[in-house]
Amino acid sequence: MTKRHLFVVPTAKINGAERVLFNLASYLLRKGDHITLVTMSRGKSTDGWNELERYSSFKWIIGTRGSEKASLLPITTQLFKLNLSEDFDYLLSTHIHVNYYLTTLKRLGLFKKAKLISRDSHAPFERYESYTKIITYKLIYRYLYGKQDLLICQTQLMKDSLIYNLGFKPAKKVEVIPNPVNLSYITSKIVTSSKEKIIVFCGRLVEIKQPHLLIDAFSNFSINHPEYRLIFLGDGPLRAELEYQTKTLKISEKVRFLGKVKNPYAWFSKSEIGVISSRTEGFPNVLLEMMAAGTSKIVTTPCTGGLNDIPGLIVTANNSSSESILDGLNKAAMLNKSFASTYQNYVIEHHTVESFWRNTVRLLNN
């Protein structure tokens, strides 16, 4: 039976959290369901959502204001109109502030028939040390959550941290469902699988991703492995500082900053080593995308739970030192085998969009 889904995201820009909903929307549209997407602010983007406009069952409501705060009134007005004109089966979001916004709308009586599914994009009690932020998040979960029919955590560690720090379950059901990857979409973007001596990083250039540690590690790594290049995909406030760091270390000719690229999967497929250098993550979607695209070897910090269960993954000793990342890079370079097929088989077995949605519906109905 055809279902109607309402997705709400902060902007049309697709990062890791939005990628989960994009993958799910693509799957649901292919199987014949209807998707209404609300991007709350900053206008339209050619970042990926536009690819779904080829489906007649896809409707896109675009907020044009410069921020979500400025968009709140016009977007809320749009959602009130949608509530009157359409009956949705499911209502989905994947950012904590959007989650509690939709919970508030449910409390006001909107979308009564729709099952509210929220997914938390990060683990706040693992991510933040500020007492003020921790108290703020506890208040959010206590008073602004609660109307969800299902709250999805990305890992068991994330769920355990949430319930332990709160002392209660913030929704009717709090369950772990691994992030989905659209394998067919990723493989369709790959031009060649021939490998080059490339180490690839993909993500926002911000403190929590710790790209400066990767640069320090690469500086030492390249002494014994001068054939490798380091490629940064993504942009952010640290870019100028990081570029200066490479010049100071005299490795700028071996490091490229490409900014946000439309097709990171082409880089993943030809890279010998992929790196996740984050301090903490809910679960790094880019890790799964590297695996799906066929990166030969992947090095990651222990930034989330479940990483040691992934075959072939090189997990560093800690998540806070360039030395541990250097050790991981050295281990990867010394391995004379590729784990590309191992990674892809793992994605197929554990992280398909089909299994993500099947588990979601099962947990809602149980």
Image: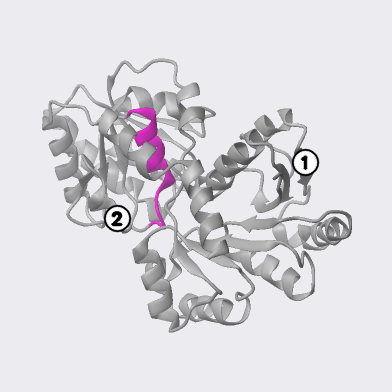
Query: For the point 34% across and 35% down, which residue is it?
Result: 291
| In the rendered image, the vertical position of residue 283 relative to residue 353, given as above or below | below
Q: Is residue 196 left or right of residue 128?
A: left
Tell me which segment is drawn in magenta. Answer: 281-294
Residue receiving disc 2: 306
Residue in view at x 76 percent, y 37 percent: 57
Residue placed most toward the observer, 179 or 127: 179
The disc label shown at residue 59, or none: 1
Helix, strand or loop at label 2? It is loop
Res 130 label: none
Disc 1 residue type?
Lys
Quadrant location of the N terminus in the rendered image: top right
State whether residue 240 is above or below residue 279.
Answer: above
Q: CA distance from mark 2 to mark 1?
A: 36 Å
Looking at this view, is 233 or 25 the one in front?
A: 25
Front residue of 148 and 263: 148
Q: Is any atom of residue 341 visible in this view? A: yes
Q: Indicate the position of residue 317 as horizontal and vertical percent values.
A: 17, 54
Q: Was residue 24 drawn as part of the magenta stretch in this picture?
A: no
**Mark 2 vs 1: CB contact within 8 A:** no
274 shown above or below 175 = above
